[in-house]
Structure formats: structure tokens, C-alpha cells
Image: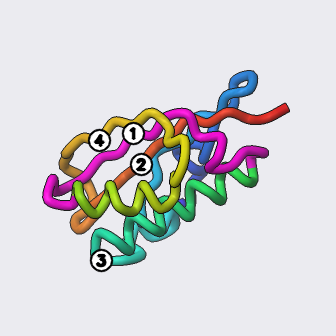
Amino acid sequence: MAGGGRSLMADAARWGDLLFLSGRAAVDPETFQLRAGDFEAQARIVLDDIASVLERSGSGLEHVLRVECYLADGGDFAAWNRIFAERFPSSPPARTTLVSAFVIDGMLVEVQVTAGVPS
């Protein structure tokens, strides 16, 4: 955690068989520095991070029910659709994509998901 304190939020919160992930961005949580500069690299880092959190929590990308994506630039929508289709090739989850401003300069994408946790 930047500043040496405790983390401001959990990676994920579980309620029953549902897992709610905090928004993921291509930002180092210790330094708040970007881990990549271009959209595609940031989007892939975010989806890799999501997959990792899901796996640690007993779930996986195949159990994602809903994806909420925030783009800094609507011009990245086509690239987001392509990358999304690569990671969710069949039975894609419900999805919302919005264009938004971010607090961290250069941040281009943030994604949060809701997933099921199989019994």
C-alpha cells in the first residue's frame, strides 16, 4: 500500500457463492505507477490480474457473470471488444462499458467483475 498503511480495499469480497472484485487497473498498488502505457497492454494486464484474483478466490474467468469496464477514451472500444472476445470466447458474461475520467494520469482502462464460485 502506498504510504505504508493498510490497504484501502479488498481484492475481492465474497457473499455466498458470489465474488465481487474491486476495480482492477494496470497500476502498481504499492507505487500507483502505471505498469504499461498503451491501451492493449493495460487491458491485458487488467484481465490477467482479474484471472489471478479469481483463481486465488476459488473461481475463474469461466465463472464471470458480469463485467463493468471503464475506458478513458471511447476510441479504444474496438480494441476492448477484441481483447474481451479473446478472454471470453464462448458464453460471454453480461457487460457494461462506459467512458470515464481517471484520477491517475495515463490510466486507460479499469475493470470490475462479479463471478460465481463453484461448489
Q: How is the image coloured?
A: rainbow
Amino acid on which the number 1 mark rests in the picture? Glu
| First in residue order: circle 1 vs circle 3 | 3
The residue that label 1 is drawn on is 68
SS class of the residue under badge 4? Answer: strand
Q: Is residue 90 left or right of residue 36?
A: right
Decide which of 86, 14 is in the foreground and name it: 86
The residue that label 3 is drawn on is 37
Q: Residue furthest right?
A: 119
Q: Is residue 31 left or right of residue 37?
A: right
The residue that label 2 is drawn on is 111
The quadrant of the rendering that contains the C terminus is top right
Give me the residue at 69% from left, 24% from top: 15
- Measured in 3D between alpha carbons, the distance from the residue under mark 3 to the one under mark 2, in whole angstroms, is 17 Å
User: Where 23 sits versus 95, above or below?
Assistant: below
Amino acid on which the number 4 mark rests in the picture? Thr
Give me the residue at 19% from left, 45% from top: 99
Contact between labelled residues 1 and 2, with CB atoms less than 8 Å apart: yes
Q: Nearer the viewer, mark 1 or mark 3?
A: 1
- Measured in 3D between alpha carbons, the distance from the residue under mark 1 to the one under mark 3, in whole angstroms, is 21 Å
The boundaries of the magenta stretch are: 57-76
The residue that label 4 is drawn on is 97
Decide which of 43, 34 is in the foreground and name it: 43
